[in-house]
Amino acid sequence: MAGNVSTPINFAVIGCGMLGRQQHVPNIAGSPKTVLHTCCDLSDDALAECRDIHGALHTAKDYRAVIRDPEVQAICIATTEKLRLPLIAAAAEAGKPVYCEKPMCTSLEEMRDIQRVVKDAGIPFCVGHNRRSGPAMLEAQAIFREHMTNPAPCPWRFDREGENRPQVEGDGTAAMAVRINDDWYSWKGWALDKGHDPFGPMLFEMTHFTDLCNWFLDAEPEEVTALEYGIFNHGVVIKYETGELATIMMGANGTFGYPKELYEMFGNGAAVAVDHLLEIRTSGIAGAPSRKTYAMLKDRHPDVGTEGGLPGWLAKKRVACQEAEKAGDSSLIFTAEPDKGHAHAIDRFVDEIQGTGPMVCGVDDAVRATRVAFAAITSAHERRIVRLEEI
Ligand SMILES: NC(=O)c1ccc[n+]([C@@H]2O[C@H](COP(=O)([O-])OP(=O)(O)OC[C@H]3O[C@@H](n4cnc5c(N)ncnc54)[C@H](O)[C@@H]3O)[C@@H](O)[C@H]2O)c1
């Protein structure tokens, strides 16, 4: 559907709140692959900003009419997760591709309904697990998967037993650690409202990370065990059918002055790390860069931390925090954001729609990530190991 390879696609963004206006609206307006055709929201102020600042060709309040509009070729859903299935069902009925923010649903029942509706209609569908499309993440995943599929022995690996080394089950099998440092003071009121988000960050944040574990390990999740205290500290362990293990630690009493996320993958005598999507480091993989840094976005401090990567980011952040303190304005702490892949995700989804690129994060992958998150929720709640087949 939707245009030829070189023809930009007319997008409607439904839900132009914080994320919509920080990411999807400007990203769609700024990409040669997309046209910001319609912005749909209930707020006049939001719509005025979309029209006056971002150049939306049309604004509207009735999402049904927007989805039916024959000029609209694809839908980007960035309402809160309270509103998902009716939008997806309407888009499926109209045969239009959908990019849907995470989490894709608020219940397992809704998840299954969405999966069925998307599959029955056969529409291209992508869930906003955007980190998969970040340049650092994409490269790290490609390096790690290549090494796991075609491992080259590391010539300097310390091999005490050599020829006498016993054969042991699990030799080479991958493991992954995810560390998330967040500051809940930055969260919106609805994120803390059990009526709005009954499962809290175990769902709305966790699906990003369960998705990445599934993607890096490329295996079928089998069992999950989790502990949590309140809604700010969570520890999750995922075991995969083929023996891989992933741990996710999310702590929301942390600070924006320190990098949010660290991913470390190990397997076949090698390591790949992604530090805050600013740099990747590898060891034990011939030909892979030992360290590589990536461009930052919205850098207000180009003359500070010019070495880039993590040390460069920390230097910029220190200066930004000092500025914020001096001005009494905490919004000044933001500078030099890592590229978490939001814009690339939409562009890559256009390639998928037009048949020139791979599936970005389709409904089955999103369902798998969501089921692992629900298994973790169940495990923490019932204090037991939960098998995925239960979910
Ligand atoms: N991928 C990411 O990195 C990321 C980051 C933040 C938020 N999110 C997700 O994005 C979603 C939105 O989060 P947010 O912080 O922007 O929320 P928000 O509350 O700021 O924005 C939601 C918007 O949806 C609009 N809306 C509600 N009902 C509507 C309707 N019937 N028709 C049209 N518009 C309607 C609201 O008016 C509001 O402007 C959430 O699901 C959140 O989990 C994803």
Image: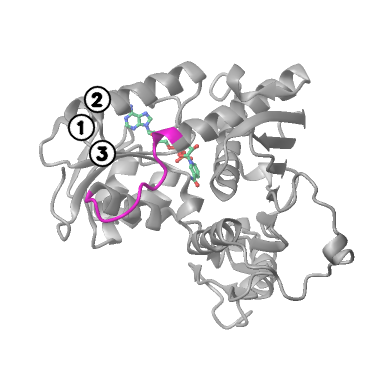
* Residue 92 coordinates in the image, percent (x, y): 24, 28
**Local SS, label 2:** helix
* Mark closest to the chain's N terminus, 2 or 1: 1
- Residue type at mark 1 is Ile
* Residue 358 coordinates in the image, percent (x, y): 34, 51
Q: Which residue is mark 1?
A: 67
**Which quadrant contains ligand 1?**
top left
* Mark closest to the chain's N terminus, 1 or 3: 1
* Mark closest to the chain's N terminus, 2 or 3: 2
* Quadrant (top left, top right, bottom left, bottom right) of the C terminus: top right
User: In the picture provided, is 222 more to the left or to the right than 350?
Assistant: right
Q: Which residue is mark 2?
A: 90
Check if residue 356 falls in the magenta segment. yes
* Quadrant (top left, top right, bottom left, bottom right) of the N terminus: top left
Q: Secondary structure of the magenta portion, mostly?
A: loop
Q: Which residues lie in the magenta part?
A: 354-364
- Residue type at mark 3 is Pro
In this view of the protein, which residue sits in the foreground, 55 or 91? 91
Q: Which residue is mark 3?
A: 97
Q: Please identify the quarter of the rendering in which residue 313 is found.
A: bottom right
- Residue type at mark 2 is Ala
Label 1 to label 3, Cα distance in Å?
A: 10 Å
